[in-house]
Structures are given as structure tokens and as C-alpha cells.
Amino acid sequence: MSSPLAPTGPIFGRAFEVEDFASLLADRERSSVTLLGGDAGVGKTRLVAEVAQRCRDLGGRVLLGHCLDLGDSAGPYLPITEMLRQLRAAEPQRYAEAAAGLAGLQPGGTTNPTEVFDAVATFLEQLAQDGPQLVVVEDVHWADRATRELLTYLFTRGLPDRVHLLATYRTDDLHRRHPLRPQLAEWSRLPAVRRAGLQPLPPSAAEELVRHLRPQLTEPQTAAIVDRAGGNPFFTEELVAASGESVGAAGLPAELADLLLVRVDSLGDDVRQVLRSASVAGRSVRHTTLAQLTELDAARLEGALRAALDGQVLVTTEDQCYAFRHALQSEALYDDLLPGERVRLHSRLADLWADRAEPGAAAAVALHAERAGRVEMAIEASVRAGEVAMGTAAPSNAVPHFERALSLASQHPELAGAVPVDLPQRTAEALLRSGDPHRAASLMRDALHGHSGPLPERADLVRLLASALLFTDLPQLPIAAFDEAVTWVDDPEHAAVHAALLALKGRTLMSEERYAEATAVIDDALTIARQGDSASVVIDLMTTRAKLDGLTGDYTGAVAGLEANWQKARAHHDVQGELRALHQLAGLQSRAGQHQAAYDTYALATRRADEGHASGDTHALSSRTFGAVLAAKRGDWAVANALLELDFPVSPMFEAGFDVVRMQLALMRGDPATARAVFPAVRAVWTQDMFLLVNAGPAMVEVFGAEGDPAAAVRMYDETLATARDVWKLHVFDAQLHLTAVLVQVLADVARENQRARSQWQPAADAGLAVLEGVVADRGTDQILGLESRAWLARARAELLRFQWAGVGAPDSALIDQFRSAAALFDECGFPYDRAESQVQLARALFAAGQRTQARDVASRAADTARALGARRLITAARVGTTGSAPAADGALTNREAEVLRLVAGGRTNGQIAAELFISPKTASVHVSNILAKLGATTRTEAADLARQQGLLD
């Protein structure tokens, strides 16, 4: 029969519900009754359509009937008669056989309802003989009394096996006196009936829906739609349909607004007044606030609220407030207010909140005062809100309040006196403590440009600018700027700022590798700081001093100093001091090749930040990022993912850093498509942070290699080097070793698949060799490099030798030695994925060299690692050497298969093979399939590789 319910596209966020119904339908010994409730637009019909398709896939039949909103004039049994019409039109013969006893549904047929009920039950029994029957009754909240009684009879009596009745209803239409409410309670007590509520889509599923409907929307646009729609698919689709220039802005599509206001228009004047006031108050509002806003007496207010609750417009919250059932309902009402009405209500709310001494009051005053046009009040309240946030260790919350006050003051110069003179500095401090040094630096540059106040105040602006710049890869302040600023605070009154400026000068000198000068400056700063009463400045200086010890060769002393500083900072409750000491300690451990110790220290820093309510601090976020990098390299992928999941927003730079780790994780799992999708957001800002460049560059080289595009891989390699050269003036740096190793691996793979292409890529390989030689020459010796850098150097050298070998004949022993060295060094680092990758290539080289037993042992260890990690691509690659023994006698290649194999190894397609051998493409395809099976290979490339190792191409 026809399909009255057919899916119109993919369904999002309902996998559990679909599978739940599918399991019921698949059980031919069961029947079921499901009452499916949900708000209008939540996706009940879409879910039912998916379930209906599952029923049809099982060879079943779908019967659909609707209840209509016709009030008392509705005819009886409307959904049943609709089902009968559908069956008669689609299957007239089956209708005649099964519906013979349903004459009672015709006018004048019978006056005994029980006869009708029995006839319907018999009708369903007849159809159940054909297979699963899905009986859908839509919109039961509009069902006439006769239909409700019929359903009660069927539910009580029980349905025949293989009959599954699914009844839907709108929960937001069930006011307190709705006739379905007691009926639902009665039905739910029956053992055969189950009641399910369809909840709004979770944010992740709503995002998928938005991206499916309009992939070109940006992240902020998508997030705005998801937030406004509240998980309601219909609202989501309407907002997407109206998206474009106005996405995320105020206002709703006209049709959606009209739909939302229909329910309100049917309520009384008092109710509408209460709802309009509530829409201005926000997503939830107290009873006392509504009383003060509406000025209704107690009886009228309570009556209006009862009507709004019964009408499913408002709901009560756990904290005894009122909230709109749908956030878009509030938007529609707010947009419908007259301008003067809106200003009056906001102004009244500002005054009400101003009289409350509770958390959030200042922020509420700022919001309502600004919307009421009371700018001075809004500025003062914004500053207070920021101060409250800073006082409760929530700097990320303080930032928007401070920035709003600055913005309002700039728009209203006549109110400049309402803004504290040090508000820019406070804002910069909040930005630094919430992990956004780039914006802090920009703000301080602007503040310095327009500053005309006292010189000590200017010195403090320099201090904050220098602090921000040190957290970035932007150009640092010149040393002369520190020397000048120090002269402005060279007196006991400003000793703390003086010491802080010297501390920053020392760190800047340290970043320029001027270690002796840096040490002298830090020692001077310590003398000044100890004369004052600033333990935090002393601890910060001692951390820098300890780091200098490490950079000048005293690793043991540096570690001891940093650990002592961390303990001192903790004793003084200096969370920022703790985090910097731990961050510097982990960095020192990592550079020394102590990756386990670094991993543990980054984890400790992250934990201390969480415990100290400083998770958004710049050092905390940096520790989280580097901790995730190490977790990914160590194979702790679940830990890495957990570190990247935060319940608060971070700056674009840190989000890009998280995205880099996501790229690396995706590639390790064998998912280059995800890495490619993440890359554009990273590339947009990678000129601002060297970390992004030197990690995303190699990742994208690997992506292009996986996609079989070596030309794009070479371009990405060149772009990464050029960016480092142009932005940071870096011609030689250790990260070039990793980047070059990945590129040459791509080129070696190309050469192995097609030896004739090797000459095309020889210049790129030569350029990579020159880069390696440049790094080693700059360092003087390999041993100066860190442990991980030495591992990548060995890997890069091995891949260069593999490129020259190209899988032809036996490999040079130096190639085997270099891969063995790389695997051992990565093992010493504790990086299992990189070790296993090196082992795979080592196994292939050993196999080709005739050392097959050793090759299988190495490949087996690589395969075990890959399986433990869940690295799909590596699992496949590691099969080489474990399944690549010579073919058994009964699996030997035929002469024709040997010919085809040689062409496969030469990179020919099935069509090209067919043309060369004068056979059909289909025959060529059959030969290739047989070859893969006999060699135990899964891909043509693997087959060619195995064939070379087994001497089948000689």
C-alpha cells in the first residue's frame, strides 16, 4: 500500500527512540501500546515516520489516522475511518476481507459501541496475520469521546500479536481540565500501556540539524539558532529558513511569531499583561517581581498566573519562579511590545533590582538600565557587576561587564566621570586571568595611546601590556620601553610596580636568550620586591629565576626551585603563582625529555586551577592544552578528549589550540576528514601563535597524504615554513624535524606505489633533507636536541632513505637502523602511536630484507599497539608482515594474475589494466579481487607492497 508516513530526510537525536520501536516491531510474538507525548514541533510526527519506515522494511503495514481539532462537532472514530479509507484505496481486496465486520462504523450501522469496538479488534486480528501492523493515531489530545473509549477498550482487552498501536498527543495542549488528562492517567495504569515523553533535542543533535539544513552557517550563527530554538526541531527549521543576514539578531520570522502569539491571544487581558511583563524580566521571574511590575491585586495576579500555567505558556521552576515553556514564546511577546511599554518595564525592573542585595543584582540593573536608556546607571552597575565577578574568582564573567561599561562611556563622553580611571587596567587583568592575552594587549595599547594621566599610572599600563604580550607570540616590548617605565616608579611608594616591571623585563630578555642580562635584572627586582610586602611578586620572580637556571644548564636546581615556588605560592593562597610555577616546571620537564613527569605536572596544574576556581586563567588553559597534547601522544585519548571539553567559553586562540589537538587525535584514529574540517578555524589565527603553526602544519601535510595529494602536501609544507619565516623571522627551529618527517613519509608512500613518480618528487625530498641538515648544523650535534626532536630526526632520515628505496629490491641497512632508532626513541618518550608507526615501516623493511621472522614480530607488536589505541589506519598498515607470508600452494597466483599484479603495482586502474591486457574491466576487477584475497591484502597498495616483499615482482 502507499506510504502515508515516509521520512523526508535524516532524523537527528532520536536514535534510541527509533531502535526502541524497531525492536518491538521485530518481535513477532508481541504487541505493544505506546502513548507518545511531546510539545508541538518537538518531532513526534517525524519520529513516527521513521518508525513507520522500519515497519515497512520488516514487511509490515502502516495504518495512519488523525484526530482533528473540530471540538464537539467532530464525528466519531475519525482516525479509524481514515485508516479504512487508506486501506481500501491501497489494498481493496485485503480491505474487503478484513473490514467485513465494520459496517457498524457507517451511519445507521449500530447503536451499540461494544459492537464497534469488537469489530475494530477483529479487523486488527485479521490484518495481523499478514505481519507487523503499526497503527498510528495522531493528535489524541483532539480525539472525540468515542475514539477515546475505543482506545480504552483496545488497551484493556489487549491487542493481537504483531499489532503495535502508537498514539501521539501534545503535552502543551493539556490544560488542567483537558479531557485527555484523566484518560492518560487511567491508560498509564494498564500493564500493556507504556507512556513516553519526547524531549527537546540535545544541543549536539540540534547543531547537526542546523548544519544539515544550511551547512554554510557559521559557528556563532548555528549556536544562536540552537539556543533560541531550545531543542524544538520545528522552531529550529523555521529559524534556519529565515536565516541569512539577520541570523542571531533580535526578531522572529513573522509566521513563527504569529504561531507563538496565537495561544496568548486567546487568554484574558490580565494574563496577557502578566506575560508581557514576564517577557521583559527574562527567562524566569519571581512572583513578587510580577506583582510589582503589573500592579495587579493578589487575586487577579494569581488568577492570571493560573490561567498561564493551565494554558501551558508558563511553567514553575525549581526555585519557585515562573518561566516560559518555550524561550521563543518570550521572544515573540517581547518583540510585540510597544517601544514605550518596553522602556517603562525595563526602567521599573532596574529600580527593583537596585534595591536587592544579592548575587546577580548589579548585572540585572546594568541590563535593564541600558535597555531603558538610563546610561549612567547602566555604567555604574556594569562596573559593580564586574567587581562582584572578580571578587568571586570569575574573571571571565567580569570581562563583559567591564567592557560594556567602557563601551557605553565611549559612546557618552559626558558620562566619563561615571567610569573609574583604572577600569581599562581592571579589564586587562580580567582578560589575562580568563585566558585572553591578545585582547588584553589590544586594550592596553589603546589605553596607552590615549593616556594623559600621571606617569605611575602609565607605568602600570606598560606593565599590563608587557604581561599580555608575554603570553602571546606577538612582538614583545623593546627593552627601552621597560627602562623608561621604570623611571616613572623609581620610589618606595611604587615599589611593587617597579619590581613587576623589572620582572617583565627579565622575562623578555629571557625570551631573547639573553640569559646573563635577564639574571641580573631578576636579581635587582628581587631586592626591590623583598623590601616591600608583595609575596606574589617575589614568588613570580623566583619562578623566573628558577627557569633561568634550567635554561642555563642547571636542570636539577631549576626543578627544585620551581617545586619550592609552587609550594610557597600555595601556602600564600596565590593561585596564579602556583599555576605559573607548575606550568614552567612542566615545560622544563618536557624539554628535558621527561614526558611522564611533564604530563603529571600539567595534570596537577589543571587540577589546582579547578580547585582554585581559576580554570580560565591563561596558565591553566595553557597547561590544559599541553596536557592534552601529551595525553594524545601517550595514547590516553579519552583523557585528551576530556581535557578539551569545558563548560565555559575560551578565547579564539585557546579554542584553536584545542582544535589542533582534535586534529591530531582524528589523524591518529584514522579520520583525516575530521582533521581537515577543523583546520580552517586554526589557520585563520595561526600567524598569532607558533604552537598552532608547528602542530597544524604537519597535521595537514598528513591529511593531504592520506587523500593522495602529494602536491598539496608539499604546498602546505612550504607554507608552514614560509609563515614561520615571515611572521617570526625563524629560518631554523626544532619543529621543522617533525614537519619534514611527515612530508617525506608522504613522498615515500608515493614513491613506493609508483617508482616512476619518484623523480617528480625528488626536489621536494632534497629540500626536506636541506632543512634537516640546517637544524643539525644550527645545533652543532644531534645530542643537543631534545628527546622527541631526536626521534623525529631519526624518523625523517629513515623516511628519506625509504623514499630513495621506493620498495625496489632489498632496503639499505641504514634504513632499517634509522627506523629502529626512531621506534626506540619514541618508546623512550612514551609515545606509543609514533613508535608503532615507525615499527610498521621497520617491519616492512625487515620483510623486504628477508628477515621475515623478525619482521612479523615487530609488525605484531605494532598491531597490538594499534588495536589497544583504536588506531584504524595503523591497524590495517600493521598487517603487513603478519599476513604477508608466501602464498600457499593452492593460493599461488596464475600467470594472468601475475601480469595483473605487475600492473597494479605500477599504479594502473582496472580500466587501464583491461586496455593493456585486452580484457574487459569486469574481468580485470575479478583478477584484482582474487589477488587481494590470495595475498591477504585489503587494498591495492598493500597488495603491491606485499608482492614486493615476497619477490613476486622480480
Image (spheres, rainbow, N blue to C red):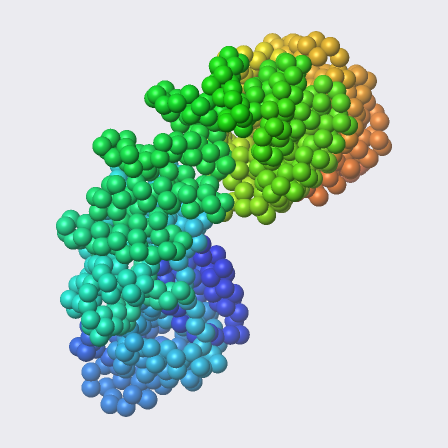
Q: Quadrant of residue 300?
A: bottom left
Image quadrant occupied by the N terminus:
bottom left
Residue drawn at 64 percent across, 14 percent down: 517
Q: In the shown orientation, is residue 141 left or right of residue 548?
A: left
* Residue under the image location 30 percent in, 47 percent down: 367
Give whichever of 791, 33 is nearer the camera.
Answer: 791
Q: Quadrant of residue 850?
A: top right
Q: Would you say residue 120 is visible in this rendering? A: no
Q: Quadrant of the C terminus?
A: top right
Q: Nearer the viewer, residue 844 or 712?
A: 712
Q: Position of residue 478 (x, y in %)?
A: 51, 14
Residue furthest to the front: 492
Residue shown at 43%/69% (left/top)? 196
429 or 150: nearer the eye?
429
**Left of 814 or right of it: where is 305?**
left
Residue positioned most to the bottom: 112
Is any atom of residue 729 visible in this view?
yes
602 up-or-down from 798: above or below: below
The relative height of residue 607 versus residue 306 in the rendered view (above or below) is above
Left or right: residue 825 compared with residue 703: right
Tell me: residue 547, above or below residue 405.
above
The location of residue 186, given as percent across then percent down, is 39, 82
Residue 403: x and y, percent? 36, 36
Q: Nearer the viewer, residue 193 or 121?
A: 193
Residue 868 picture location, percent across and down: 71, 43
Q: Quadrant of residue 742?
A: top right
Residue at the image position 80 percent from the left and 21 percent from the top: 817
